[in-house]
Image (cartoon, helix red, strand yellow):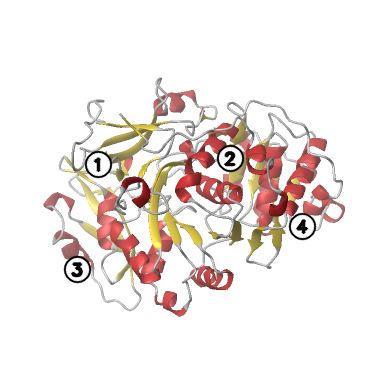
Amino acid sequence: MFASPFPDVDIPEASVFDFLFADVDQDVLDHVALIDTVGGAQTTYGELIERVNASAGWLAARGIGAGDVVGLLAPNSSLFAVAFHGILRAGATATTINALFTAQDIAKQLTDATATMLITVSALLPQAREAARTVGITPENLVVLDGDGASATGHPNLDDLLAPGAPAPQVDFDPATHLAVLPYSSGTTGNPKGVMLTHRNLVANMAQIRLLFAMRSDDNVLAVLPFFHIYGMTVLLNAALQARATLVVMPRFDLTAFLDTIQEHRATYGYIAPPVAVALAKHPLVDEYDTSSLRVLLSGAAPLDAELGAAVAERLDVRVLQGFGMSELSPVSHAMPVDGGQEHFGEVAPLSSCGWPVANTVNKIVDPADGNEVAYPAEGLSEPGELWVKGPNVMVGYLGNEEATSATIDTDGFLHTGDLARVDHAGRVFIVDRLKELIKYKGYQVPPAELEALLLTHPAIIDAAVVGVTDVDGEEIPKAFVVRRSDADLTGDEVIDFVARQVAPHKKVRRVEFIDVIPKSASGKILRKDLRSPTA
């Protein structure tokens, strides 16, 4: 077992709203909190707090409060921020829904979460209305934030929520047990499950990452990662507001718009996922923009290859960092400090690691074969094992699923991440791959992430994914799905040879298929289940 090397931080017994806004300085109220890149609207901290309080008052007047769940289906915008924090301010629980979901997907989550209200935007109204109808949510409980309002459509809009000016309710609950949010696990390895996160979970994680990420009030933070996903929810929507920074909000990732935003708004800090890093490292369009304002890019949601990260750092002259987390950990459990670790440890962490365990946490690395803890190394790297994490950011469980909860959180409070990891002598953690994603070829373990990172070093390959498929003899083999450059004349045999020259024989790619795009979740994780087939 090894503990975080960072000093424990104080975790106030406070709600998310109080932690963020109860002690806001008067001189902060006029500071811009959010800029919508679509439309250009700016929202100050004072305006944000007023709108959150007013929307909480409207919800309370409608009988929404402790014990109630409200669905929130919207892309990134200042409207999302108001609605999200309004729900929490009213004492209710927000279940955030993937903006790419179909009506069937939305209805499934609303049903599982027992949501009684749904808040959305006009662009998503067709699927939202169908889902609401399916689960029995009435038109007056389907809020369309940017719609024409209740008098015209039957659906309240943001103006309807704010107009009454009802005071925010007085709510009294235990932050350690009261559910703030109910995001759903991505479902990349199974059916999505409701992740129960309390106010204390979210407050704890903000406190744990505050000094590490070191966002400042003069930072313009790129907010392109979806707020509905726990990564964007915590490190952007919450932690950036806690730092009194300005969030430059993009509803979705588009490389041209992304680069435009950096240049126009002089963005200084960005949170990205590996697919964005691939574009920044390889696309010629990047050279046409002034990105000199950027000082930090932090990658998460999926493993970032060290060579890819280094290419981004060199091309943009920016510090590239990596972290690790999962919805069940609120989400950040490991991270590099903003200086890479120089001040704390006298050296910068290798980009192949995800940094150190965050404050107030302890870790174990456990051999999945025998359940024994892997020895902490005196030098170099430990043997691989499953990463276990214990701390105040660990979820309270999966909604209505005691079996899955007990299989994930043991009686000592350690959350079993399902990720294969190693630790070095300096306490830095290296993620190998998801345990369930490991390919077993003739008894040998083959980590897909290692092969994907190697494939991305090929100049003719834009993106890649590797999965295990079954060959005609019933043997599981590594198969690569490759997106090649449009002007590249690259064959499958050349891809196989490229990998074979650089890996052990059991890790060789045995099949190659060229496709137009690698399917990924909104947070940037490869959806391997969409690539697998019974035979190949």
Residue highlighted by disc 4: 147
Q: Is residue 95 above or below residue 99?
A: above
Residue highlighted by disc 2: 108
Residue highlighted by disc 1: 424
Which residue type carries mark 1? Asp
Residue highlighted by disc 3: 494
Q: Position of residue 287 (x, y in %)?
A: 42, 77
Secondary structure category for the residue under label 3: helix
Q: Is residue 430 above or below residue 112?
A: below
Do tag 4 and tag 1 residues touch (Cβ < 8 Å)?
no
Decide which of 3, 383 is in the foreground and name it. Answer: 3
Which of the two labelled residues, at mark 1 and mark 3, occupies the earlier sequence position?
A: 1
**What distance separates the C-alpha of mark 2 from that of mark 3?**
44 Å
Q: From the image, which quarter does the N terminus lie in?
A: top left
**What distance separates the C-alpha of mark 4 from that of mark 1?**
53 Å
Secondary structure category for the residue under label 4: loop
